[in-house]
Image (cartoon, rainbow, N blue to C red):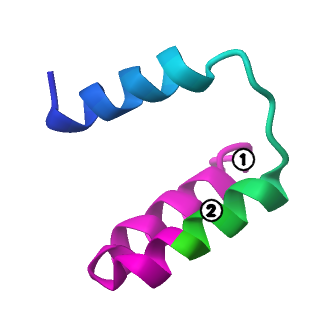
Amino acid sequence: MYFTDRGIEELVERRGEEEVQMLWLAERLREFVDLNPEFETPVERLATWLARLDDDED
């Protein structure tokens, strides 16, 4: 189990029944990076990965 799995499990336990808009998520990611600029690169990679998830892999 990765260290991040605990955070993901907590997120599912606390908010797993909620639905969120992508705009809300984007704002939370921006807020997080503003408070934690050292995580800018990983957040950028996550956002890019999520944005391209359904792209064809031709």
The answer to which image quadrant residue 30 occupies is bottom right
Whether residue 2 sits left or right of residue 23 in the image: it is: left
Q: Looking at this view, is 25 or 41 the one in front?
A: 25
Tag 2 residue? 28
Name the dominant secondary structure of the magenta segment. Answer: helix
Quarter occupied by the N terminus:
top left
Q: CA distance from mark 1 to mark 2?
A: 28 Å
Expressed as whole percent of the image width and height from the top left, the position of residue 4 reads 25, 37
Q: Which residue is pictured at 16% across the width and 31% down the height?
A: 2
The answer to which image quadrant residue 42 occupies is bottom left
Q: Which stretch is magenta?
A: 32-58
Vertical order, 51 against 20 (above or below): below
Secondary structure under badge 1? loop
Q: Which residue is pictured at 80% across the width and 39% down the height?
A: 20
Vertical order, 16 against 21 (above or below): above
Tag 1 residue? 56
